[in-house]
Amino acid sequence: MRLDHTTWQEVEDYLKSSDGILVPTGSTEQHGPMGLIGTDAICAEQVAMGAGERADALVAPTLAYTPAPFNMDFPGTISLSVPLFEALLGEILECLDRAGFRHIYFINGHGANLDPLRRVAGQVPALTVRIRSWWDFEDVNDLRQNLYGEWEGMHATPSEIAITQATHRTLAPGDAVTPPVKLSAEYIRRHSGDRHGPADAHRKQFPDGRVGSHSALANPRDGFTLLEMAQQALSNDYRKFLET
Ligand code: NI
């Protein structure tokens, strides 16, 4: 159930039986030659919507404007500064608190959101906050590793693109038809959470926008499987979260 498709009376009724809500967080940034600008937001929102149906949970509007400064040299990217994003998150938590929500579950689709989310999570003492990226659920992670192995990479991943193919559209691979430069384990470790350098250097290093991910391995069938699995995993984890 989408929060923005309910009335205030419906929310008031909902709060009599549940104090939980799912909040999807994504990004608005380039995702390589065959990945949609909204990939991270689409994935987080689709996972949240399916889990929300399974667990009778409200789903807040997706936070799609987030920090992605390293992608600013690719047109279409819209990046908020980290302080602005943290202020936005903080005010959203205050509003949810005031309405009577107590369990706030951020379902994330963009690595660079994680540090800001963690910093803001404890800001409203009455709230219990959980933060998970959709690819982190164990069976989802196993599946994407089985499907794509090391070609999953870091950005414009075949798994996230497969989900957008299942729910939106499938583009011809174009420049993504050839495998990207393979990343070292050391590079992946040092840049987890999207800890990338300045925009000009980032575009120079990854000219087509893929960061170690072989996007062209994606297909809509994989996307449906990944999405269903992530929706079920989130629904299970959300129900447990409500008991904490
Ligand atoms: Ni992404």
Image (cartoon, rainbow, N blue to C red):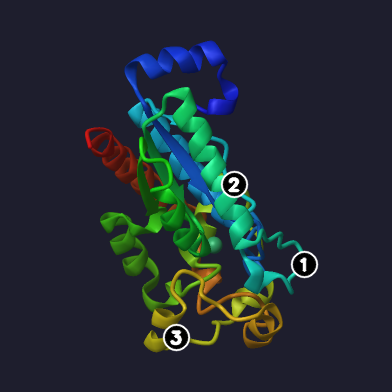
Question: Dot 1: within a 10 Å radius of its alpha carbon, few (fewer than 14), some, or many (20 or more) residues?
Answer: few
Secondary structure found at label 2? helix
Where residue 123 sits in the image (x, y, percent)? 43, 46
Instruction: For marks 3 and 2, give the CA distance.
Output: 31 Å
> Does the beta carbon at disc 1 come under 8 Å from ligand 1?
no
Residue toward you, 90 or 64: 90
- Which mark's residue is nearer the viewer, 3 or 2? 2
Secondary structure found at label 1? loop
Q: Quadrant of residue 27?
A: bottom right
Residue toward you, 109 or 139: 109
Q: Residue at left 37%, top 64%?
A: 144
Tell me if residue 8 comes above or below residue 234 in the rendering. above
Question: Dot 2: within a 10 Å radius of its alpha carbon, few (fewer than 14), some, or many (20 or more) residues?
Answer: some
Question: Dot 3: within a 10 Å radius of its alpha carbon, few (fewer than 14), some, or many (20 or more) residues?
Answer: few
Q: Earlier in the sequence, mark 3 or mark 1?
A: 1
Q: Which mark is residue 88?
A: 2
Where residue 236 sits in the image (x, y, percent)? 27, 39
Assign ligand 1 to one image quadrant.
Answer: bottom right
Q: Which residue is mark 1?
A: 75
Q: Amino acid at mark 2?
A: Leu
Where residue 24 sits in the image (x, y, percent)? 50, 44
- Which mark's residue is nearer the viewer, 2 or 1? 2
Residue toward you, 50 or 121: 121
Q: Which residue is mark 3?
A: 187
Q: Amino acid at mark 1?
A: Pro
Q: Amino acid at mark 3?
A: Tyr
Q: Residue at left 64%, top 52%?
A: 65
Q: Are marks 3 and 2 in contact (CB under 8 Å)?
A: no
Instruction: For marks 2 and 1, give the CA distance.
Output: 24 Å
Secondary structure found at label 3? helix
